[in-house]
């Protein structure tokens, strides 16, 4: 009896220790996030000290940090999801690489779309400086709340959608429909339709190219030795040109001939570096698709890092664009029509917030993008990452606030639907879509068991999980109006408190 009672007491103590450990782990991430937000507020209070609305800058710093955390938790999943889904990176490795490159992209190349997000969406002549500050605060908080909710339920929504919807909703609440620059909204909305389509098309074309030049060849290893270094070289050249035009723009602005020369030079260097590495890796390699796919592992990691850099450069504006507008307006006393200043300390808050949000809250969405839409291997994930990176880089260079979520998920869809097309073509001899009304002529004289087996085999060729497609698209559609409504309500609340 004594030993039995002692065992029960020890089990209770052990259970309490496990529960305490789990509770501490669950509270650690919110605790670290809270410390970051308080640090952002203190930093802002020391930097912006003059003017009647300086207290609003401190509040806005907290909101901007909160939004940056949510950008990292939700949006960055699109960058590392394919690499994790293809088992090319562990979750810890993905978080480390993404955190470094997201912060680097935000600090080195961020800011080109800040004016689009913070100023060009509104006709500033309709507002006073104080009203504009309240509009930006409402838009930023509304978008952060919506993205946070989406992250909690596991939906990869667009933070760009959320911010634009918030700015539009708060702007209408403040000064009516005339306060919104609708032509700019139309341009941004068009990019939301075009960008996922381009991401998907480019990824499908790239996968088709790799299948034709490498996978379908009899001697796959020899083909890989030729083409994989070329793919790596092209990616290296694109990255070099982007750095020359965007990443180093604050200290060096080369002309077009210099940029093209750098691109060609780095393309050659990338090819020279990749050639011996691929030859070394492919020694004694079996002539099988699975083994050849392993050659894309390192290029996939590099492509994912490139995509993280591009995301940091493009989407840091979602976190700090409205905040930068608030700081500029408070310091000048009125809205700056000529442009929004972007101090380094504002960018730093956005960069650190994105990296922290990824590390603390990002793994769940990474798994959704990498594993739940379609099955990925190293080759497919490489196509997704490279196509998404190229599209985001072009958008950032044009100063267009496209959705990296749309682009990356569109690329995943493109790869998945191309595989369906190819798989169905192999099964039926044509690219006839598989649906309930489709009747395979070969099955007209088949037994019920044969027909059922054939139908099940066709259904297994549906390589994109439709329920996730519909859920993601629904989340995309509802994000803009939801953020707009919340932002309008918050503006009225802020206006009542300040007034």
Image (cartoon, rainbow, N blue to C red):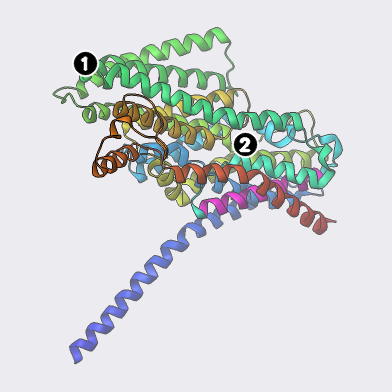
Q: How many residues crowd around disc 2 within 10 Å: few (fewer than 14), some, or many (20 or more)?
A: many
Q: Main secondary structure of the magenta part?
A: helix
Would you say residue 229 is visible in this rendering? yes
Q: Residue at x 72, y 39 (%)?
A: 325
Residue 139 lies in the magenta stretch: yes
Measuring from the top left, give residue 127's x and y in whole percent: 85, 40
Query: Which residue is painted at 70% across and 47% down in the image?
Result: 484
Location of residue 186 by image quarter: top right
Which is more toward the observer, 409 or 103? 409
**Residue at mark 2:** 317
Q: Secondary structure at mark 1?
A: helix
Q: Which residues lie in the magenta part?
A: 131-152
Quadrant assignment for the N terminus: bottom left
- Kindly identify which residue carries mark 1: 222
Q: Nearer the viewer, residue 188 or 305?
A: 188
Mark 1–mark 2 Cα distance, whole angstroms, equals 45 Å
Q: Residue at x 62, y 36 (%)?
A: 317
Which residue is outermost to the front? Answer: 445
Q: Is residue 363 left or right of residue 282?
A: right
Q: Is residue 154 above or below residue 256?
A: below
Residue ranking furthest to the bottom = 1
Q: Position of residue 453 (x, y in %)?
A: 26, 42
Q: Secondary structure at mark 2?
A: helix
Give the mark, 1 or 2, whose residue is nearer the N terminus: 1
């Amino acid at each position: 009896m004594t030993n039995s009672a002692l065992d029960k007491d020890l089990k209770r103590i052990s259970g309490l220790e496990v529960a305490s450990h789990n509770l501490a782990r669950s509270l650690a991430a919110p605790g670290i996030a809270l410390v970051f937000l308080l640090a952002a507020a203190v930093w802002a209070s020391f930097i912006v000290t003059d003017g009647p609305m300086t207290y609003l800058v401190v509040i806005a710093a907290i909101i901007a940090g909160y939004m940056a955390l949510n950008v990292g938790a939700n949006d960055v999943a699109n960058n590392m999801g394919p690499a994790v889904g293809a088992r090319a990176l562990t979750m810890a490795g993905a978080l480390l690489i993404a955190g470094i490159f997201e912060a680097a992209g935000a600090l080195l190349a961020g800011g080109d779309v800040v004016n689009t997000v913070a100023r060009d969406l509104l006709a500033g002549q309709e507002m006073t400086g104080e009203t504009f500050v309240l509009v930006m605060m409402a838009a930023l908080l509304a978008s952060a709340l919506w993205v946070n909710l989406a992250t909690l339920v596991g939906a990869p929504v667009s933070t760009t959608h959320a911010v634009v919807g918030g700015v539009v909703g708060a702007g209408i609440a403040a000064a009516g429909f005339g306060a919104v620059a609708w032509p700019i909204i139309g341009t941004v909305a068009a990019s939301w339709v075009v960008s996922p389509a381009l991401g998907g098309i480019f990824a499908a074309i790239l996968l088709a190219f790799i299948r034709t030049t490498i996978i379908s060849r009899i001697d796959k290893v020899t083909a890989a030795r030729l083409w994989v270094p070329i793919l790596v070289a092209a990616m290296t050249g694109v990255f070099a040109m982007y750095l020359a035009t965007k990443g180093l723009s604050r200290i060096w602005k080369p002309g077009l001939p210099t940029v093209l020369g750098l691109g060609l030079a780095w393309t050659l260097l990338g090819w020279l570096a990749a050639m011996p590495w691929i030859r070394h890796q492919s020694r004694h390699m079996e002539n099988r698709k699975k083994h050849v796919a392993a050659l894309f592992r390192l290029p996939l990691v590099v492509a994912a890092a490139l995509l993280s850099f591009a995301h940091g450069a493009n989407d840091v504006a979602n976190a700090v664009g409205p905040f930068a507008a608030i700081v500029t307006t408070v310091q000048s006393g009125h809205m700056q029509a000529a442009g929004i200043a972007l101090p380094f300390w504002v960018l730093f808050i956005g960069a650190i917030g994105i990296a922290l949000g990824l590390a603390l809250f990002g793994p769940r969405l990474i798994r959704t993008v990498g594993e739940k839409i379609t099955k990925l291997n190293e080759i497919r994930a490489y196509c997704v990452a490279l196509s998404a990176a190229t599209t985001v880089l072009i958008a950032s260079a044009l100063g267009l606030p496209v959705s990296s979520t749309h682009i990356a998920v569109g690329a995943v869809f493109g790869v998945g639907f191309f595989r369906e097309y190819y798989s169905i073509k192999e099964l039926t001899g044509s690219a006839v879509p598989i649906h309930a009304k489709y009747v395979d002529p070969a099955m007209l004289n088949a037994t019920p068991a044969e027909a059922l087996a054939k139908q099940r085999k066709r259904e297994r060729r549906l390589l994109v999980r439709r329920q996730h497609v519909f859920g993601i698209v629904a989340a995309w559609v509802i994000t803009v109006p939801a953020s707009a409504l919340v932002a309008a309500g918050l503006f009225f609340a802020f206006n009542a408190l300040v007034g």
